[in-house]
Image (tube, helix red, strand yellow):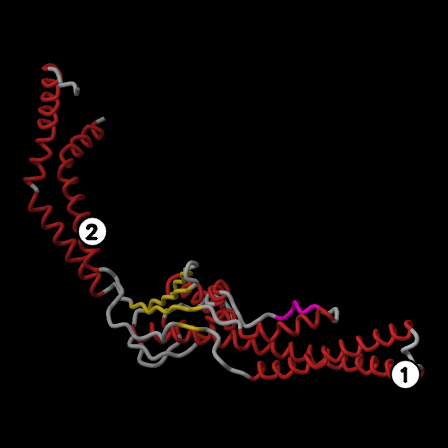
Amino acid sequence: MPEHPTTEESVSLDKRVEEWTTNARPYVDRVWRAKWKIALTTFAAALVAAALLLFVVEPYYETSVAVFPNAPAAAGALGGLSSLASMAGVAMGGFAADAVSLDVYMTLLQSEPVVEPVLTSKYQTAKFKDSVDLIDYFEIEPDEDLSPERRERKRLVLALKEFNEEKVSLELDRQSNILFMTVEMPESALAAEVTNRLIDNLDYYLRHKRKSQAKERREYIAERISQVKDSLAEAEEALKIFRDQNRIVLTSPTLQTRQARLMRQVEVQQTIYVELVKQYELAKIDEIKDTPIVQVNQEAREPIKKAGPPRIKIMLVLIAFVSLLGTAYFAVREDARRYWRIVKGK
């Protein structure tokens, strides 16, 4: 059964409550006397904060797109070639398929080759009368102590850093294997345009790389066709010479074995040659095709509502903070002054 407090414990508790109430009473009285000052101070702080949020702090807009992994279109084309190359003793490890992981997308979306064209492109904005690039839009000041070339290079590097750290956020959902990209800009139309241009530049970069790989693949296959063609001619000539020199081979097991070996060499070289010719034609098609690689859920559209700053939330937090600060100040002000006089008198 629960123990009930004794009479002495009850009296002690009541005494402590009474002492706490007596000690806190002066502070409560001070706060009550200064209630209008606290209210006016809080109201003034709220007005200043409202003015700053309305006229100084810029609103911003966000656009988001979902990027999906692309289909490995070239994997099938390289499959037959790789197996035949292995038969011929040639490694095909230098050629990648079309498929690119989303981790690579994340890295490329923050790389200079993809981001620089976005930063240096011209945009029509409400902030400037004439079209400007994002380096000027971010108002990155040039370093006059540097040469013109290094000055512009430094501005680009600073703009790239600000863009990656403050304007673009990337989040990879590994469970669904979808990359979410969000771009934040002070203007709604600019946010959508920058988002779409960033995706377009990523796609262009990947397509350019694909064409370069296709060209390398075509050149490699062309070289292999020439080599295999010579090997096939040699194997066919060796078989022809053997048959000319040995008209009757059915009676000799040794001659039959040699003929079978020579025929196998011709068949292997013929198979490799035919497959290489097929892959050569596919490589030529890959080299000139211009189909998009990056897949998104939809093109970024101009947002209607502002994404921030959250003015009401900021105002409520500020009002609560100023009220608590004012309450604490007026509660301990007299004690602080008394303590200061004592310290100063010493």
Does the magenta segment cover residue 93?
yes
Q: Position of residue 308 (x, y in %)?
A: 26, 63
SS class of the residue under badge 1? helix
Residue sitting nearer the eye, 145 or 2 = 2
Considering every residue shown, the one lying at the far right of the view is 245
Q: Where residue 94 appears, x then y in whole percent?
A: 65, 69
Left or right of 6: which side holds 287?
A: right
The quarter of the picture where residue 269 lies is: bottom right
Task: Residue 39: tell me if it is visible.
Answer: yes
In front: 256, or 273? 256
Q: Which residue is mark 2?
A: 317
Q: Amino acid at mark 2?
A: Val
Q: Amino acid type of disc 1?
A: Ile
Q: Rate crowding at label 1 as few (under 14), some (14 to 19) or many (20 or more) other CA atoms within 10 Å.
A: few
Span of residues in magenta? 91-95
- Point out the tag, 2 or 1, that comes first from the N-terminus: 1
Give the side of residue 230 with respect to residue 16, left or right: right
**Residue 145 seen in the figure:** no
Residue depicted at 11% across the width and 34% down the height = 27
Indicate whether 276 appears above or below 146: below
Q: Which residue is mark 1?
A: 241
